[in-house]
Image (spheres, rainbow, N blue to C red):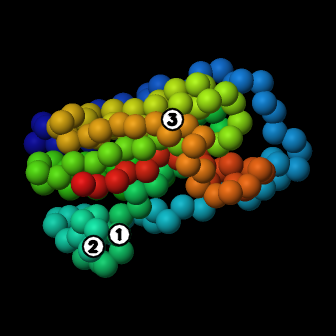
Amino acid sequence: MTKQWLRNLVVPMLAGLAITGCASNGNQLSPTDQAVAPVETDSAPPPASAGSLSEMDGDGNPYFPGTRRALARTFYFDYDRAVISSDDLAVLEMHASYLRDNPDRSVVVEGHCDERGTREYNLALGERRSGALRSFLTAAGVSPRQIENVSYGEERPGVAGHGESAWSRSRRAEMVYR
């Protein structure tokens, strides 16, 4: 009971304290870029009963318990930030539960950025974003041996384009199960 209480208290606190990205590189958004609608993610809140995550799709990715809908594996970030959104915490906890229950499975956490900033800066920011997910998962009890981090910086954009709508889809971390 104490362990569960501690997990319910410490994990959200650690996620909330995740290290933010460094200071801005000076690029400012134009007023037209700021008016773009926010990114919509495919990560809906989990069902009320979290149950076991033993079911997987054809690629070995876990489903929401009791459904045939895969857990979201892409997590989006604000501009120049590496802080996990509070909306993503429930889904990340389900990934952590799955990895704890399946110690033979592992995941690669890929960090990505938009095209703004230098190559070196974006690689470092992508590393911080993948590191934020890694920190959450390890704080939730996942073995560090099950998690590999990689940063692609701006090299693999989520959507081709040169405006906020494309950039917002590139600022992400993705979990790839192996």
Place residue 161 in its image quadrant: bottom right
**Residue found 13% across the figure and 37% down from its top:** 3
Mark 1: amino acid: Ala
Mark 3: amino acid: Gly
Closer to the camera in the image, 83 or 151: 151
Q: In the drawing, does residue 13 fall left or right of residue 100?
A: right
Q: Residues within 10 Å of mark 2 (few under 14, many from 20)?
A: few
Mark 2: amino acid: Asp
Q: Which residue is under mark 1?
A: 70
**Residue found 68% across the figure and 41% down from its top:** 115
Q: Secondary structure at mark 3?
A: helix
**Residue found 26% across the figure and 74% down from its top:** 58
Cβ atoms under marks 2 and 1 closer than 8 Å: yes
Spatial CA span between label 2 and label 1: 7 Å
Spatial CA span between label 3 and label 2: 27 Å
Q: State the mark number for residue 57.
A: 2
Q: Secondary structure at mark 2?
A: loop
Q: Residues within 10 Å of mark 1 (few under 14, many from 20)?
A: some
Can you give x and y, in whole percent of width and height, for residue 140 in the image? 24, 40
- Disc 1 or 3, which lies upstream in sequence? 1
Q: State the mark number for residue 126.
A: 3
Vertical side of 21 occupied by 146: above or below: below
